[in-house]
Image (spheres, rainbow, N blue to C red):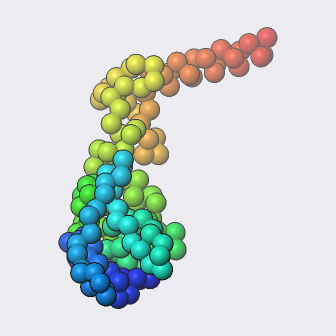
Amino acid sequence: MVGHEGLYEVSDAGDVRSLPRPHTRGRVLKQMTDPAGYKRVSLSKGGYARPRLVHHLVLEAFVGPRPEGMECRHLEGDPADNRVGMIAWGTPRQNIMDLVDHGTHVQARKTHCAQGHPYDDQNTAFTRRQRRCRTCMAQWQREKRARRRAKEV
């Protein structure tokens, strides 16, 4: 593994293993799940332990170092699935669009606007890949026209 050559290795299935060293046997490391659902392991080197995201370790080992401005995409939407075919480097925009496509984006899960109007076929408008409430948009237009008329008088 990059930065930990001879100390650890990672499999294409997302398992991280410490290699045998004097006085210790090699073993598969226990993975902790963070609040967002991503798997982490703690890697030690030179007396210091550092937490690392498993999906980053897998991509670095099997795909290559992270390109500038890229981040890890979970192609199936499961943050705990770190198999090589299920993750890839991508742009932040691709990552956000993956969240929308999987239905895990916070805004994509909303069924009503902030005013309580439903996001249904008749009341939903799409502008620049964003949902808008037609009722609220119409209300905003009415208020805007009223403000304009008040200025003219």
Asked whether residue 134 appears in the rendered view, the answer is no
Pick the residue in front: 150 or 133. Answer: 133
Residue sitting at x 35%, y 73% = 57
Please, is residue 114 above or below residue 86 in the view?
Answer: above
Q: Nearer the viewer, residue 149 or 41?
A: 41
Q: Quadrant of residue 84?
A: bottom left
Residue nearer the viewer, 22 or 86: 22
**Residue 45 placement, left or right of 62:** right
Above or below 78: residue 65: below
In the image, is residue 38 above or below residue 145? below
Residue at 24% in and 61% down: 81
Viewer-closest of 71 and 38: 38
For residue 107, what is the image quadrant?
Answer: top left
Classify the position of the N terminus by image quarter: bottom left
Q: Horizontal and vertical percent for residue 124?
A: 37, 30
Residue at horizontal 22%, vertical 72%? 28
- Decide: is 43 above or below 106: below
**Where's residue 30, x and y in %?**
26, 64
Measured as percent of width and height from the top left, residue 54 is found at 33, 67
User: What is the quadrant of the C terminus in the image?
Assistant: top right
Extreme residue in the left direction: 13
Residue 111: quadrant of the picture: top left
Which residue appears at 39% of the width and 40% of the height? 106
Q: Is residue 104 visible?
A: yes
